[in-house]
Amino acid sequence: MNCCLIAADTFMNILLQNKKTQTYVTDLSTWTMQREKAHLFETGIEALFFCFNRNLKNMQILGEFVNPRINFTIPVTDLRGG
């Protein structure tokens, strides 16, 4: 199997989306319906802390691959209480 094909197939974009409005966080911390304008996070942890630090609710982390069959979503849940 070609190593470059494997790398290209596993490249992942990480985005944040509001589950209720289906809008994405942009680079300017505003919201957009256009996926192309969404901010791309370097890691899922960065996206998670972005939500926690801004007290964002109803959010999900999207992991998007070149091959959409392996895309995933993770709901953001703050279990710290308070």
Image (spheres, rainbow, N blue to C red):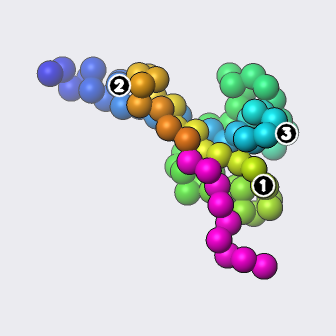
- Depth check: 58 or 55 in front? 58
Residues at marks 3 and 1, CA–CA distance in whole angstroms: 15 Å
Report the residue that reaches farthest toward the bottom: 82
Mark 3–mark 2 contact, CB under 8 Å?
Answer: no
Does residue 54 sit above or below 41 in this rendering? below
Mark 2–mark 1 contact, CB under 8 Å?
Answer: no
* One can see residue 40 in this view: yes
Of the 4 image quadrants, the one containing the C terminus is: bottom right
Badge 2 marks a residue whose secondary structure is helix
Mark 3–mark 1 contact, CB under 8 Å?
Answer: no
| Residue that carries the numbered disc 3 in the rendered image | 30
Q: Give x and y (percent) for residue 53.
A: 75, 63
| Residue at image point 70% right, 31% down | 38
Report the residue that reaches farthest toward the left: 1
Badge 3 marks a residue whose secondary structure is loop
Residues at marks 3 and 2, CA–CA distance in whole angstroms: 30 Å
Does residue 41 sit above or below 68 in this rendering? below
Nearer-N-terminus badge (2/1): 2
Nearer-N-terminus badge (3/2): 2
Task: Tell me the crowding category of disc 3: few under 14, some 14 to 19, or many 20 or more residues within 10 angstroms, Cα based.
Answer: few
| Residue that carries the numbered disc 2 in the rendered image | 9
- Check disc 2 and give the amino acid type: Asp
Is-magenta flag for residue 75? yes
User: Residue 18 vs residue 69: left or right?
Assistant: right
Is-magenta flag for residue 9? no
The numbered dot on residue 57 is 1
Q: Which residues are magenta?
A: 74-82
Q: Give x and y (percent) for residue 75.
A: 62, 50
Does residue 7 sit above or below 46 in this rendering? above
